Image (tube, rainbow, N blue to C red):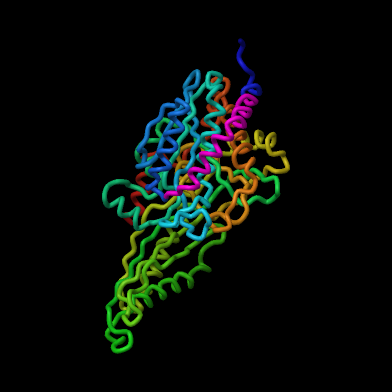
Amino acid sequence: MGRLTKEEVKAKVCAAIEAAQPKLRELAESIMAEPELGYKEVKTSAKVQAIFDELNIPYTNNHALTGVKGRLKGKQSNRTVAMIGELDAIICPRHPRADDLTGAAHCCGHNVQIANMFAVGMGLQAVMDELGGDVVLFAVPAEEMIEVDFRNKLREQGKIKYMGGKQQLIYEDAFDDIDMAMQMHVETAKTESGEMGLGTTSNGFIAKLIEYHGKVAHAAAAPHEGINALNAALMGVMGVNSIRETFKESDYFRFHPIINQGGTLVNCVPDYVQMESYVRASNIDAIVDGNKRVNRALTAGADAIGATCIIKDLPGYLPMRDNPDMNELLRNNSDTVFGEENVYERPHMTASTDMGDVSHIMPVIHPWVGCISGVLHSAEYEITVPDVAYIKTAQALAMTIVDLLYDEAKEAEHVLANFKPALTKESYIALMDSIEEA
């Protein structure tokens, strides 16, 4: 039997993805039913390992605590493309499928990502002897940057070095044997049929833990003897608000704090307040400069009251930069699956993802697929176009991998020849460490 043409390989892959749907949707539902937060995804990791076992795909586990990494071997291993899915959920207690104890819910769509990861793997598994490279299926932890205090404790215990799962994986050398990577994410559908939104750029951020220390006193009998840490925090936030007009619109600057602890008793002057926030912007220079100015304003709030402000800056995520060559391949395949009228290039995204960190080191694409109603991370989140979520997206991504690895992986070589990494792994780690030390 002669070698299959590239189009014949793609047709075989797409048919296998459709045939695998019952198993894939059962997996997505199982993960939805037991959501777990970042670096705690023990049950979800076990479910992923069980599918790898069932498919006879070799894998390694315990990457960044809960990550699982499988590998499909091609007829040659010239290059390696990773298909990534994320294990963690978000906190959304109001969602109807939220965990009663933790408030975790998969209204982030990460269970759909894991299903897509396996859909791509199951589609490609029967045609790997037609490809000149390997495919890594990588289930990764802790994309949602939440529970910052908890993750900082993991760092202090030496269990992780970085807050985000992909950051930790970079540090652990888990991307060293991968040349390029891709993943998908769900978003609100613009039409009843759903659409493919090609990724472009996004904001990055620095994470912040902010403490204000004052002096306790009776709030009614002797407020003059106290130093109100809550007032200091409010003054600090007002200080940031007062300088917002000085940030360039082209940098898409964002600062959005929450108060985790604002006092203990209403009749006591609050002597301790803890806040948490991000400083976001579209480029590294704007993030670093904006963070310095925010810190100055926050500290001034404490100075005005006579309190003390302690700020702990933690490495957040870098801005996203989708690879144009890989995006063009995805566009061509998506035109076939979705229809050209349902494929578009998304504008800059002011939210963030740790896939941005990976994109500074290797070529990456991160499309956003319209297949839900409601808003991401909200109680109204619901998948409304399941064929887009589970079939069409996986087919478009799997066919893109075929393009990259067919014919001795020549297209992958072309992508890499045109790619100039913004950072090496070593300079990336140095940058992350410098943020905390600043």
Q: How many marks?
A: 0
In this view, 122 is above or below 200 = above
Residue 108 location (% of width, % of height): 52, 50
> 229 left or right of 194?
left
Characterize the magenta stretch by its predominant secondary structure. Answer: helix
> 131 left or right of 219?
right
In this view, 168 is above or below 58 = below
Q: Quadrant of the C terminus?
A: bottom left
In this view, 120 is above or below 247 = above
> 73 left or right of 390?
left
Residue occupying image coordinates x 46% and y 28%:
54
Residue occupying image coordinates x 50% and y 45%:
110
The answer to which image quadrant residue 22 occupies is top right
> 5 left or right of 414?
right
Residue 434 visible somewhere in the drawing: yes
Residue 139 location (% of width, % of height): 45, 38
Residue 142 location (% of width, % of height): 42, 47
The answer to which image quadrant residue 343 occupies is top right
Residue with the most extreme bottom position: 221
Q: Quadrant of the N terminus?
A: top right
Residue 166 visible somewhere in the drawing: no
Residue with the most extreme top position: 1
Q: Nearer the viewer, residue 118 or 51?
A: 51
Q: Is residue 195 magenta-colored?
A: no
Q: Which residues are magenta?
A: 10-36
Residue 207 location (% of width, % of height): 40, 57
